[in-house]
Image (cartoon, rainbow, N blue to C red):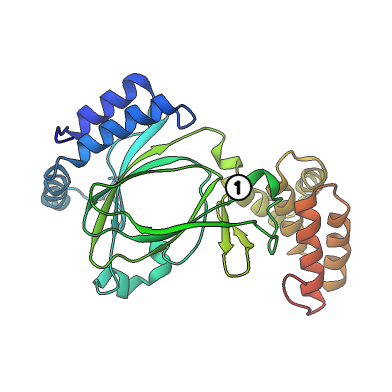
Amino acid sequence: MTDSSTVEECVEAIAAAGFDSRDDGSVDHAAHWLQRLGNNQHFLGDLMVRELQQRHCTASDGSAYGAQAIILSSARDGFFLRANIWPSKTDHAYRASGASSFVYELPHDHNFSFLTYGYFGPGYVSDYYEYDYENVAGFRGETAGLRFVERSALTQGKLMLYRAHLDVHSQLPPASMSVSLNVMGIDDAQGWHDQYGFDPSTDRITAILNPTSTETFLRVMVGLGSDEAMDLAASFGQHHPSDRLRLASFEARALLLDTAEKDALWREAEMSGSRMVAQEARLRRAELCGQGEWV
């Protein structure tokens, strides 16, 4: 397909039908328009020129631009558009910031689905895996059940769908600077769905990667130390529907305790009724005893 589109045309066309990654027809429609946008080899360079020309005119930068991501549209109808810049190992951005700043060599899944298109350059390389999200509790050291699929590059013109809670990838830097375009799926509930880091060499979950603002508020609330705050944290630890927030309530309270009190609190967490919280509590108690992780 050689037809091209502007960002505005792409956004309006996808928005007209909405984006639902669970619907094959919706995905095909969005993919068609993302490819048309990708066929426009001038829009992104022109956009960058305009941005650089205008930056000196404003006192502060209120745009949605960062070191790697360029937000091309606002969120609407279940999606937004984004461009991502992927530096190679020889680029200054990589040398200055390091691999982790660009999520290289950090295997992870996503708690949302998105389409990606190789727009410029040879593309980053990924080792791809699949796993069964519903079969894991999400604690550190848990066996993930990763299944290796392939190693491949997001070459120019290649179009892929990353499926939430199924696809895992470990990205490697491209041979030279590359750019991808994305249709990013959005869901009001996605913040409550965990995103995990993995270690494929041991087939283990290493971390939850998407802490929420609620967890931060909880830690601040407990740190301020009112009786009401402590009572609410205790209630969250036993009854909140989110295992992640239940764990955060124990973590926040543990920060205020000595070693013996921490051990007692984590012993309580082991009896919380949540498999994830119980396993994390077991790890914390082992760490208190100096036995390290994943014993």
Q: Residue furthest front?
A: 149
Q: Is residue 282 above or below residue 3?
A: below
Q: Residue furthest top?
A: 16
Residue 157 appears in the rendering? yes
**Depth order, front residue of 167/254:** 167
Point 24% across, 60% down: residue:
122
Rendered location of residue 55, percent (x, y): 17, 51
Q: Residues within 10 Å of mark 1 (few under 14, many from 20)?
A: many
Secondary structure under tag 1 reads loop
Q: Which residue is mark 1?
A: 194
Residue 257 appears in the rendering? no
Point 35% across, 35% down: residue:
80
Q: On the picture, is 9 further left or further right than 187?
A: left
Tally of marks:
1
In which quadrant of the rendered image does the C terminus lie?
bottom right
Identified by mark 1, the residue type is: Asp
Rendered location of residue 172, percent (x, y): 38, 65
Rendered location of residue 266, percent (x, y): 83, 61
Q: On the picture, is 36 further left or further right than 133?
A: left
Rendered location of residue 248, percent (x, y): 70, 53
Q: On the picture, is 122 further left or further right than 126?
A: left
Point 26% across, 68% down: residue:
175
Point 41% across, 41% down: residue:
114
In which quadrant of the rendered image does the N terminus lie?
top left
Q: Is residue 104 above or below residue 51?
A: below
